[in-house]
Image (tube, rainbow, N blue to C red):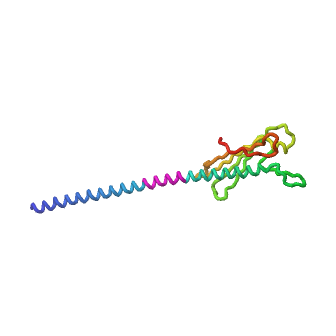
């Protein structure tokens, strides 16, 4: 009888040890799983931040390219295009009055991105009657804004770049003054 009772106690202790070992194994596996999930989550957060930073850099490049495109066209304003007739180039971005116009420039490799360039021409000499002279006076402020479509039909602004052109006193050409911050 003692022998049977000792065997039962031994089996019970062995079962308790096995149960505790299984419980510890499950807890260790759970901890490993949680740590792995945390590492994956942190890695994903860093990836998303890096992707956003890459988007901002790319958007700034697009905005600067749009400003350069418009600026180069404006700098041609007033240049002679035909020697025999004396015809001069007229940029679509220059007006003969105080105007602000917005143009959309498509980005060939970014389908859900949009670049909007606002051209604000401020004519200094409003009393000038010659339209060509008015076109070559004042200052032009350029603002290029790059946005990206987001889920739910929203837009997220990625970059904004501003530039300025002016006509110095007694000059007949626009001059690029450079980029500036708002």
- In percent of width and height, residue 95 lies at 80, 45
In front here: 156 or 177? 177
Please say whether residue 26 is one of the residues in the magenta stretch.
Answer: no
Residue at 71% of width from left, 51% of height from top?
68
Span colored in magenta: 38-50
In front here: 139 or 148? 139
Q: Is residue 96 visible?
A: no
Instruction: Locate residue 19: give its quadrant.
Output: bottom left
| Quarter in which the C terminus is drawn | top right
Please say whether residue 44 is one of the residues in the magenta stretch.
Answer: yes
Determine whether, in the image, residue 11 is placed left or right of residue 111.
Answer: left
- In percent of width and height, residue 123 lies at 79, 40
Residue at 17% of width from left, 60% of height from top?
10
Q: Is residue 118 visible?
A: yes
In front here: 64 or 55? 64
Determine whether, in the image, residue 21 is placed left or right of residue 50.
Answer: left
Q: Is residue 123 above or below residue 36?
A: above
Residue at 51% of width from left, 54% of height from top?
47
């Amino acid at each position: 009888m003692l022998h049977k009772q000792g065997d039962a106690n031994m089996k019970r202790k062995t079962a308790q040890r096995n149960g505790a070992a299984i419980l510890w194994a499950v807890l260790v596996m759970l901890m490993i799983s949680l740590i792995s999930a945390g590492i994956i989550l942190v890695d994903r957060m860093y990836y998303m931040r890096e992707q956003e930073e890459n988007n901002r850099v790319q958007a700034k490049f697009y905005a600067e390219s749009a400003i350069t495109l418009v600026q180069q066209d404006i700098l041609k304003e007033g240049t002679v295009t035909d020697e025999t007739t004396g015809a001069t180039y007229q940029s679509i971005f220059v007006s003969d009055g105080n105007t602000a116009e917005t143009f959309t420039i498509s980005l060939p490799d970014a389908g859900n991105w949009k670049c909007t360039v606002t051209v604000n021409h401020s004519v200094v000499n409003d009393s000038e009657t010659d339209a060509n002279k008015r076109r070559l006076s004042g200052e032009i402020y350029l603002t290029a804004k790059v946005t990206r479509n987001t889920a739910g039909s929203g837009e997220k602004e990625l970059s904004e770049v501003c530039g300025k052109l002016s006509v110095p006193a007694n000059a007949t050409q626009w001059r690029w003054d450079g980029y500036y911050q708002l």
